[in-house]
Amino acid sequence: MKIRSDWQPAEIELIHNTPLLDLIYQAASVHRQYHDSKKIQVCKLISIKTGGCPEDCGYCAQSSRYKTEVKPQALLEKETVVNIARVAKESGVSRVCMGAAWREVRDNSQFEQVLEMVKDVTALGLEVCCTLGMLTEAQVKRLEDAGLYAYNHNLDTSRDYYSTIITTRTYDDRLNTIKNVRKTNVTVCSGGILGLGESVADRVSMLHTLATLCPHPNSVPINILSQVEGTPLENQPHVPIWDVVRVIATARIIMPAADVRLSAGRARLSQVEQALCFLAGANSIFSSDNGHMLTVTTACPGYDADREMLNLLGLEARPSFVGK
């Protein structure tokens, strides 16, 4: 299987609609060509600045436009973040993602504090990923100089469906941020969310956009909507596991070298369902020590439970800095 960036939507649709067991077999075969199938990267997401975001993303508990349980909090102290990261590393985590509920990065004292966090967490020997909203090429360069390993900026869904979920920034805004990251050596992490009310065609379109980036994103998170009371999408139905497996398997086949991350929403999947996702090509999970991935917004399995699951499946936690 060669790495391609010239995929056509019809090709991706054909792969996505392959009979499920055949699709899983194909994806598992491709996965073994490009990755050690026994290795799973365990990641930790730290919300360094929670709530109060001016964006109107219909799924997000951190938007200031919706009445949710999330209360705005100030930027965490650097020492707090470093201590969380240190505990995470001791529990098998090799990648820490620091997220801030901002629309965009501003050149101010808070950004200076984030740069110091990046330096100190990187010094622990961890891959550091940030998700801070839109940013300029100059800002990415400063993050790179601080040691940033990856930048997360999800597409969320297809271009056509995007404006029904978010109106405060455009699809091209998102793609432009990815372009800015690509002008540095910082790796790109970009994926989407399943369960927003999108169609299969929207999922195929989103995967097509990702798979025609050249090069592909180094990391493709597949998130499952966590319905949050108070948001416009609070009553969306749960995504069937078969849909999740199909998207993971398709992503694995069309972006074979990328890490495919089973991200938000994993807490409601059984061990058997997660095993299917790993078989289909997912090779990364987010774990936690407090039962949440983003403070009170998204449930996340704990370190001990994940260690038990990996042991049961004969899988091992992957060390840092082996996926670039």
Image (spheres, grey):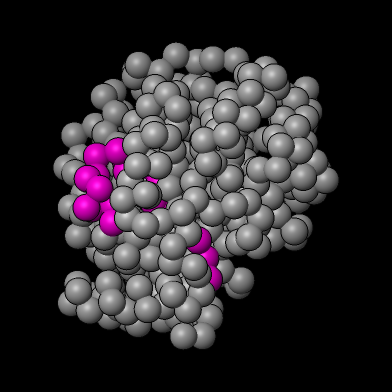
x, y percent for residue 211 = 48, 71
Q: Residue at x 67, y 26 (%)?
A: 82
Q: Is residue 239 magenta?
A: no
Q: Is residue 264 magenta?
A: yes
x, y percent for residue 10 = 33, 81
Q: Measured along the vertical axis of the image, is residue 150 above or below residue 97?
A: below
Q: Residue at x 53, y 28 (%)?
A: 47
306 or 147: nearer the viewer:
306
Is residue 155 something that shows in the picture? no
Is residue 90 something that shows in the picture? yes
229 or 90: nearer the viewer:
90
The boundaries of the magenta stretch are 257-275
x, y percent for residue 74 = 60, 15
- Horizontally, is 133 left or right of 56 in the view? right
Quarter of the picture containing the C terminus is bottom right
Q: Residue at x 71, y 37 (%)?
A: 124
Q: Measured along the vertical axis of the image, is residue 91 above or below residue 187?
A: above
Q: Residue at x 28, y 80 (%)?
A: 14
x, y percent for residue 232 = 28, 32
